[in-house]
Image (cartoon, grey):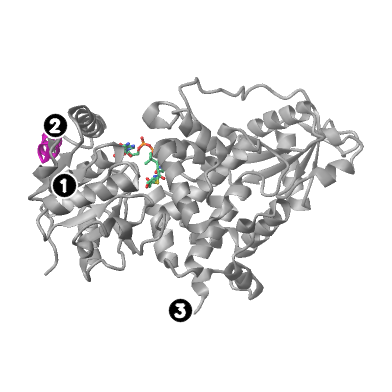
Amino acid sequence: MADTFETVGVVGLGTMGAGIAEVFARAGIAVVGVEADPAALERGRGHLEGSTGRALTRGRLTEAERAEILGRVTLTTSRDDLAGCDLVIEAIPEVMEYKRALFADLDRICKPSAVLATNTSSLSVTEIAATTSRPGRVVGMHFFNPAPVMRLVEVVRTVTTEDGLADDIAALARRLGKTPVTVGDRAGFVVNRLLLPYLNHAVVLLEHGLADRDGIDAAMRLGAGFPMGPLALLDLIGLDTSYEICEALFRESRERRHAPAPLLHELVAAGLLGRKSGRGFHGEEAPQTPSAEEKPSVSTVAVVGEEAEAGEFADRLVSAGFKTTGVEEAELVVALSRTPVVRQAVRLPHPDRLVGLNLVGEQVAEVASTVLTSPGAEQVATGLVRILGRTPVVCRDRAGFVVGALLYPHLNDAVRMYESGYASVEEIDTAMRLGCGYPAGPFEMLDRLGLQTVRDGLRDLYDEYRDPAFAPAPLLDQLVTAGVRSIRDLPA
Ligand code: 3HC
């Protein structure tokens, strides 16, 4: 008979634990929330009241509904109060020793039929299960931050999870209004295994000075269409949690791409953990307001690049009041390009006047400054981009600029994951759309961008950085060679 879960325990009422408790209570399920001491319990209560209070202010909940939800949650500092629960979910810090000790305790306290679940981001569910006398009744139930909002739950079954239990937990996730994706026990599961290497890469690029913080975030939010920039998302997840996930991935893979960026380590060591500590990559500083109206003090611009695109861009400049000329006399030379432009610059009489410009989507233009570009030319180019209604992202003249450098390896990782047999195309796309709010899953993005564009972009990145992680996945390469347009067109 399928398991029914009427009383659920949540251990650890930090951001995630409190969010998980709220999700269950909203679905009409009684919750026992446990924290280590009265102060932590009060903070947990604060999370619950804050989140439901916000829904109330926005008109998403009535006073009565809010009271009902909060009324379903019993808060306690005694683990013994979990004795009657049908399911207990652990959401304590990501330290294996703590988890093992807790699960040994839960095993002793909870009735034999109870299911014990972990919300771990990246630790081994199998290892946690092995500390109990009921490894068959232990699963991963992984929620995403903010738990009340993100619609995915990863259900993780281990080699010892008993038959049917993952299905019962998946059914429970649906009852909570979530979409489950069931996977095996590998570090990071689907989402964190794909997401964190991309976020970590953004930190590496920031540290290397490819672009500044706001540029990187704007490029991925406005250019690639992600709901948040990678550095803002790291702040949301917590830099300590992010660091731990990267460590766990690295421990399993030994890939350099998974090794936490030194800057991430430094911020964590300094106690700058993101939103939870008030400051991470983003702090409390006043936002910079660009002076959009200020017209660049340059009148003659030359546009070079692929003929049709350059012609169209030149027309837009003329409509905006600029005069277009040949490259010899132009005060600014704009090279529309998806690849580095320094070779074009050296062929000019004034290489310092050239900037690369890559139009990404409808809202962003990457402004690539070469080692020869003068600060004045860069400034003029960013002003010009703003006049054209786009957000400029100033970056160094490197393969992929910002969006390509971050996005292509991220998509490549998804192909590698599929190729490894860990998850299907549908599972990966669903997980990234619902777990991270992506406008499209990685394979949908690959189809939209074109497999060849991504494969070629990866080759450029590999040629420049020589990082094996950027070498196109063999499957991607083969699909392009075979002229297959979508991975979905492969015979089943
Ligand atoms: N708690 C509860 N509800 C929240 C919330 C929170 N912390 N933050 C936002 N919301 C709700 C709002 O109330 C609003 O709902 P409403 O329309 O019913 O009023 C809705 O979410 C949208 O909020 P906003 O309009 O304020 O903000 P945005 O539209 O900018 O959306 C976001 C905010 C949902 C966080 C969006 O930016 C997003 O999807 N970001 C990506 C988040 C992500 O990737 N999460 C996964 C991280 S990985 C992870 O968690 C795994 C772990 O192991 C590390």
| SS for dot 3 | loop
Q: Position of residue 187 (x, y in %)?
A: 41, 56
Q: Position of residue 336 (x, y in %)?
A: 74, 45
* Three-letter amino acid code of the residue under disc 1: Gly
Q: Please state if 451 lies on the left or on the right of 272 as rendered.
A: right
* Three-letter amino acid code of the residue under disc 3: Ala
Residue linked to disc 2: 63
Residue 91, relative to residue 387: is it above or below? Answer: below
Tell me, yes or no, whether the two marked residues, 3 and 1, touch with CB atoms within 8 Å.
no
Q: Quadrant of the N terminus?
A: bottom left
The tag earlier along the polypeptide, 2 or 1, is 1
Q: Residue sitting at 68 percent across and 53 percent down?
A: 461
User: Gap in Å between the C-alphas at discs 3 and 2?
Assistant: 51 Å
Front residue of this view, candidates 427 and 201 = 201
Tell me, yes or no, whether the two marked residues, 3 and 2, touch with CB atoms within 8 Å.
no
Q: Is residue 66 magenta?
A: yes
**Residue range of the region highlighted in magenta in the rendering:** 63-74
